Image (cartoon, helix red, strand yellow):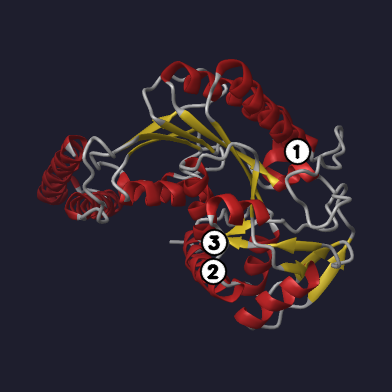
Amino acid sequence: MRILVFFFFTVLFAVVLSVKLLADALENSGNHARNNSDIKLLSEKIENLTLQVNKLQDSASKPFSKVKKLSYLYKKRILVTGGAGFVGSHLVDRLMSEGHEVTIVDNFFTGSKKNIEHWIGHENFELIRHDIINPLYVEVDQIYHLASPASPPHYMFNPVKTIKTNTIGTINLLGLARRVGARILVASTSEVYGDPLVHPQDEDYWGHVNPIGPRSCYDEGKRVAEALSYAYAKQENVEVRVARIFNTYGPRMHINDGRVVSNFIQQALQNNSITIYGSGKQTRSFQYVSDLVDGLILLMNSNYSAPINLGNPDEYTIEEFASVIKEIIGGVSPIVKQNGVQDDPQRRKPSIRRAKLYLGWSPKVPLAVGLKKTIKYFEKELMKENAKDKPL
């Protein structure tokens, strides 16, 4: 809040100074034939600074979302790596609303400050810009380790960095958990099953993964993260929880992350061709982000330490899913097929028997309901993007 006030007065001073410069310019315009373009430029600067002052005033007066008041007996200090990302920011919202002290660590490779800016300044919230491949020293009770690019274009963009994040980064977080006695939840993925030979996939299946393929930086990185977790649990008595997360969608997805949900929604909203890679007969299952957050919190606070699938067992072919999105959005987008992608899983459906049995968890949000909320978010984001592209 003090920083906000400081910026407010700094910008206010700049406005006053600009007004004085403009007044001087107008006063001397008769004597020195002041160039009209200079005066116009000053006027534009004043207008811009005034907008910044108004924005700061709005930020200073904007109330935070309601949070519970917890006593120190129940309030936890919680670290969320990747907390400015899609899933992480929704998890942060839930933890903050429950009254905990939340610290976010993010290097903003795929995360965005706009996802968590509504908490900046709150007494229970702290943001640290940091890359977890470097050691981190904080005092916390729980760690949600979500940091890692999760969409193919993002994790393939820098495969070495992806491997480092999921190996060296995981070692650093497990080491932190050991030092401070914190419980840690490691976000794994359904990609550990690769292109599965077992359907649906349960947690006892070891997977069918290409260790040197284009997706291996992520697939094998997460498999090593799981191995590290249980090595630390066995050798160092660290309390670990492992969530194998299946396809998740919802507001705050990166609009260009290359995943099937964001691709199809964006293409349909812009009346472009809806592009399917491969036959379209490959299957996926989609869970809404609030269901995943429920599962993560239940798993963290449970007494169950083996890996648990968190996903929606409703299975759709990619063709069916494209038709569902087209029907909701409308428009005239044709559905077209292109060559398939190497190592693309052909079937993907979680068995959630373990989650139901040990967590009492199952997804609640129907696909149509979740998609409508997600589409509404994408509409707003595309409007913002289009506004940026328009010449002033």
Quarter of the rendering occupied by the C terminus: bottom left
Residue 100, placed above or below residue 29: above
Asked whether, in this view, residue 254 is left or right of residue 189, the answer is: left
Residue 56, placed above or below residue 286: above
First in residue order: circle 1 vs circle 3: 1
First in residue order: circle 2 vs circle 1: 1
CA separation, marks 2 and 3? 11 Å
Disc 2 element: loop
Query: Which residue bears the numbered disc 1?
Result: 219
Q: Nearer the viewer, residue 117 or 271?
A: 117
Asked whether, in this view, residue 18 is left or right of residue 316, the answer is: left
CA separation, marks 2 and 1? 28 Å
Residue 262 place in picture, x, y as percent: 63, 61
CA separation, marks 1 and 3? 23 Å
Residue 54 place in picture, x, y as percent: 20, 55
Residue 304, placed above or below residue 36: above
- Tag in front: 2 or 1: 2
Q: Amino acid at mark 1?
A: Asp
Asked whether, in this view, residue 342 is left or right of residue 190, the answer is: right
Badge 1 crowding class, 10 Å Cα cut-off, few under 14, some 14 to 19, many 20 or more, is many
Residue 365 tag number? 2
- Tag in front: 2 or 3: 2
Quarter of the rendering occupied by the N terminus: top left
Q: Amino acid at mark 3?
A: Gly
Residue 20 place in picture, x, y as percent: 11, 44
Residue 59 place in picture, x, y as percent: 23, 51
Q: Amino acid at mark 2?
A: Val
Look at the numbered discs 2 and 3 and tell me whether their residues touch, using CB distance below 8 Å: no
Residue 250 tag number? 3
Taking the spot 24% from the left edge, 49% from the top edge, the residue there is 49
Disc 1 element: helix
Q: Nearer the viewer, residue 83 or 79?
A: 79
